[in-house]
């Protein structure tokens, strides 16, 4: 395998992953959330940065018609 062929194969894989992530985000239960981008990170970059601090977003579930009380917020961590 040549280096050029490997680069083209990696681009094809990344494009496929981005399309898959976008497709899955449109099928999610969070209608207002979408995947903005997909990035690849080498293991050396990840070790150098350690772990990013998590951003916490609060979401509220839509209450069912039969529920009278408001549901508590759902917390999700984004790494």
Image (tube, grey):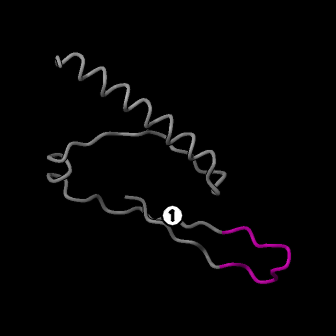
In this view, 51 is above or below 13: below
Q: Is residue 18 left or right of residue 68?
A: left
Quadrant in which the C terminus appears? bottom left
Q: Is residue 43 magenta?
A: no
Q: Residue furthest bottom?
A: 69
SS at badge 1: strand
Residue at left offset 55%, top offset 67%: 58
Crowd tier of the residue under label 1, counting other residues whose Cα lies within 10 Å: few below 14, some 14–19, many 20 or above = few
- Boundaries of the magenta span: 61-71
The image quadrant of residue 13 is top left
Residue at left offset 69%, top offset 78%: 71
Where is residue 35? Give x, y as percent: 51, 44
Quadrant in which the N terminus appears? top left
Where is residue 16? Give x, y as percent: 44, 32
Q: Which residue is at the front of the view, 11 or 68?
A: 11
In this view, 4 is above or below 40: above
Q: Which residue is mark 1?
A: 57
Q: Is residue 64 magenta?
A: yes
Q: Residue furthest right?
A: 65
Q: Residue furthest front?
A: 1
Residue at left offset 30%, top offset 28%: 10
The image quadrant of residue 29 is bottom right
Q: Is residue 36 left or right of residue 41?
A: right
Where is residue 42? Give x, y as percent: 21, 42
* Numbered disc total: 1
Where is residue 11? Give x, y as percent: 34, 25
Which SS type dominates the magenta stretch? loop
Q: Which residue is at the front of the view, 26 or 2?
A: 2
Q: Is residue 72 left or right of residue 22?
A: right
């Amino acid at each position: 395998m040549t280096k050029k062929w490997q680069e083209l194969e990696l681009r094809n894989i990344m494009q496929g992953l981005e399309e898959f992530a976008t497709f899955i985000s449109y099928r999610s239960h969070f209608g207002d959330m979408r995947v903005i981008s997909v990035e690849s990170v080498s293991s050396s970059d990840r070790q150098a940065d350690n772990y990013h601090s998590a951003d916490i977003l609060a979401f509220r579930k839509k209450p069912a018609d039969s529920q009278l009380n408001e549901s508590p917020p759902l917390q999700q961590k984004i790494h």
